[in-house]
Amino acid sequence: MFHAGDNLKKMLEREIAYYRAQNENLKKELSDLEKTYSNNRTRLEIISVDYEESEEMIRILKSLTK
């Protein structure tokens, strides 16, 4: 015997499956973005230190030319 509730249940199960798949994709994307952010932050810190060292070298070299 067929019930209208069976259709609703199947529809809801498909919706649940859709949102679960979407959640998995979003979780992976978030993880990738967190890794990228972490890598960029590390790179920023390295560049910042390199910049400061370069600025210091410029000051030292300028003082030697006086």
Image: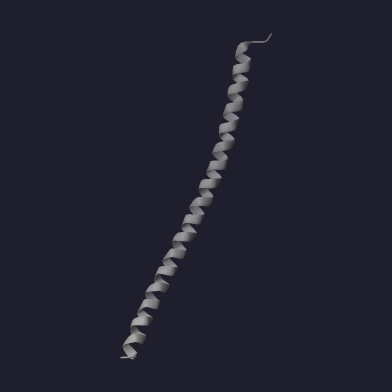
Tell me which colouring the rendered structure shows. Answer: one colour
Q: Residue furthest front?
A: 66
Residue 20 pos. (x, y %): 57, 34
**From what the image shows, is residue 52 above or below residue 6?**
below
Q: Choose between 65 and 33: the one closer to the eye.
A: 65
Write the residue at 31% across / 87% down.
Answer: 63
In the image, residue 43 sits, relative to residue 9, either above or below, namely: below
For this orientation, the residue located farthest to the top is 1
Q: If the image is split into quadrants, where does the N terminus sit? A: top right
Coordinates of residue 3 in the picture (x, y in percent): 64, 10
Q: Nearer the viewer, residue 38 or 66?
A: 66
At a point 63% along the width and 17% down the height, the residue shown is 7
Q: Is residue 57 left or right of residue 13?
A: left
Residue 52: give x, y in percent of width and height: 37, 74
- Residue at (43, 64) in percent of width and height: 44
Name the residue furthest right.
Answer: 1
In the rendered image, which quarter contains the C terminus?
bottom left
Q: Please say if 40 is above or below 5.
A: below
The percent coordinates of residue 49 (x first, y second) are 40, 71
- How many circles with numbers are drawn on the protein? 0
Q: Nearer the viewer, residue 36 or 51?
A: 51
Whether 10 is drawn above or below 53: the answer is above
Q: Quadrant of residue 4?
A: top right
